[in-house]
Amino acid sequence: MTHALLVLHCDNHVLVVAKPAGIPSVPDASGDESLLELSKNWVGERYAKPGAVFLGVVQRLDRPVSGVMVFARTSKAAARLAEVLREQRARKTYWAIGEGSAREDEGELVQFLWKDEERNRVHVCGRSRQDAREARTRWRVLERDAGRTLYEFQPATGRSHQLRVAAATLGTPLLGDLKYGARAPLEDQSIALHARELAFEHPVTHEELRFEAELPALATWDAARRRLTRS
């Protein structure tokens, strides 16, 4: 299946796109077309580049997750963007829908996580484990409706599956996320996690950039869309 690329911004140094759920961020064992490949093709066609196109990968979203992603168009921009993300100077905001009702309205979750690479599953562990990595997530409830919780997540770290594990820890696994406790899949095999906003300093001009990706068209997100209409 070929996906159309939705470009949010492009200049000589960065490319910002909206990732649809169901497509891998980078090539993987599935052999399916990745967002990186789609983006390289777009740059090659847009700027009539006959040779290989460089795009630096500085962040990733899980295959079933949608939302804003940024690629670097030069190695210098890649190094600077990676530093911005590593030093937590970018602002990442996700919306998510969990099964059940959150017990509290907001908080910060600090966990230590380790990843079982063979099973592609992340576990909460003690900080003494050698391969444990700290994960910090600020969260708040935007709305409770029909036995579901609409969250806003702002991760202060960028660990694998961090927000999926956080939602499960809060007692509300994300809709469709069978790996972390959801009861049923969503119809398009996505999970209800969307990278809604990304803000960061431009790696060359140092201008503050901010981008939003529209919520997925899936009916699961209808209540979230109504909230946006009201605001």
Image (tube, rainbow, N blue to C red):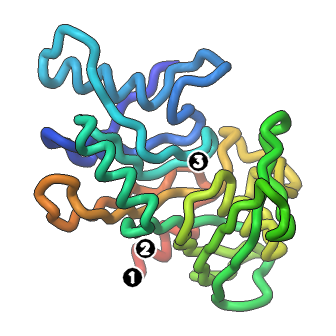
Describe the element under mark 3 as helix, strand or loop: loop
Mark 3: which amino acid?
Val
The local secondary structure at tag 2 comes to helix
Find residue 49 and report its horizontal and vertical position in percent.
16, 15
**Distance from the alpha carbon under mark 3 to that under mark 1:** 24 Å
Position in image of residue 43 (x %, y %): 23, 26
Percent coordinates x, y for residue 159 in the rendering: 63, 57
Check contact, mark 2 vs mark 1: CB within 8 A.
yes
Q: Residue at 78% across / 38% down in the picture?
A: 117
The answer to whether the residues at label 2 and label 3 have Cβ atoms under 8 Å apart is no
Quickly name the residue at label 1: 231
Residue 18 falls in image quadrant: top left
Circle 1: element type: loop
Q: Nearer the viewer, residue 138 or 223?
A: 138
Name the residue that disc number 2 marks. Answer: 228
Q: Please name which of the two marks, 3 or 1, marks the residue nearer to the observer.
A: 3
